[in-house]
């Protein structure tokens, strides 16, 4: 009973008081590199089997699974069967919202996992994957090159402005085509 209360208080401290999901994950036994962002507090029942490299973002709703619960159904005279396996995520990785990473998966460096993906097999370095099951859909290097050419940089942001104004000032510069939908709507409203 005391151990359960301690777990609840620890979770409450990290989740609501310090808002430090990386600290909480380390407290649970996860190995985490530098400059990571974890936008989740759900690390499964064996977080000590999870290893994360440097500069990794794990977004909201992501599930990192380290066991297969379906093996509970498999029994013989020796009893139930269990399957546990590690999850390893390299450096410079982004895992999109509501994705699932299955037990035993190794994700290489410089990888983007698209939102809602189900990663059932290991992923090599330098790719973008998406879907259910996740498949390679692009190259990290191609994505990086295109975004460096098209998207707003930190130097383009006016940090003297409040956050909403700063973002509104540059949001149309990151849209596709010569005249974005937002610009068209604004022009119609002004006319």
Image (cartoon, rainbow, N blue to C red):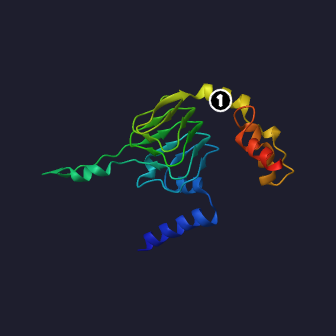
Query: For this view, does 77 lie left or right of residue 105?
Result: left
Q: Is residue 176 toward the left or the right of residue 67 in the image?
A: right
Is residue 125 visible in the rendered image? The answer is no
Identify the image quadrant of residue 32: top right
Front-most of residues 50 and 120 = 120
Q: Is residue 93 visible?
A: yes
Q: Nearer the viewer, residue 25 or 168?
A: 168
Q: Crowdedness of circle 1 by 10 Å Cα count: few (<14), some, many (20+)? A: few
Rendered-image quadrant of the N terminus: bottom left
- Residue that label 1 marks: 144
Q: As displayed, is residue 76 above or below residue 146?
A: below
Question: What's the residue at 41%, 48% (across, down)?
Answer: 65
Could you tell me residue 99's position as x and y percent?
48, 45
Q: Position of residue 74 (x, y in %)?
A: 20, 49
User: Percent position (x, y) of residue 124?
Assistant: 48, 28
Q: Secondary structure at mark 1?
A: helix
Q: Residue at x 65, y 29 (%)?
A: 144
| Extreme-left residue of the structure | 77
Residue under the image location 49 percent in, 43 percent down: 51
Q: Position of residue 57 (x, y in %)?
A: 59, 44
Q: Is residue 100 left or right of residue 140?
A: left
At x 53% / y 70%, what residue is drawn?
9
Q: Residue furthest bottom?
A: 1
Q: Furthest residue to the front? A: 191
Count the labels in the image: 1
């Amino acid at each position: 009973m005391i151990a359960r209360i301690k777990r609840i208080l620890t979770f409450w401290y990290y989740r609501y008081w310090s808002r430090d999901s990386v600290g909480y994950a380390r407290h649970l036994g996860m190995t985490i590199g530098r400059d990571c962002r974890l936008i989740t507090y759900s690390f499964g029942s064996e977080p000590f089997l999870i290893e994360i490299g440097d500069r990794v973002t794990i977004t909201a709703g992501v599930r990192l699974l380290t066991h297969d619960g379906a093996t509970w159904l498999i029994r013989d005279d020796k009893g139930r069967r269990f399957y546990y396996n590690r999850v390893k995520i390299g450096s410079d990785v982004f895992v999109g919202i509501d994705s699932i990473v299955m037990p035993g998966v190794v994700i290489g460096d410089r990888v983007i996992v698209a939102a809602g993906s189900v990663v059932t097999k290991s992923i090599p370095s330098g790719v973008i994957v998406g879907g259910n099951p996740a498949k390679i859909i692009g190259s990290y290097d191609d994505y990086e090159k295109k975004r460096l050419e098209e998207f707003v940089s930190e130097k383009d942001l006016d940090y003297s402005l409040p956050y909403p104004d700063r973002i509104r000032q540059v949001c149309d510069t990151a849209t596709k085509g010569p005249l974005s939908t937002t610009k068209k709507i604004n022009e119609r409203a002004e006319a």
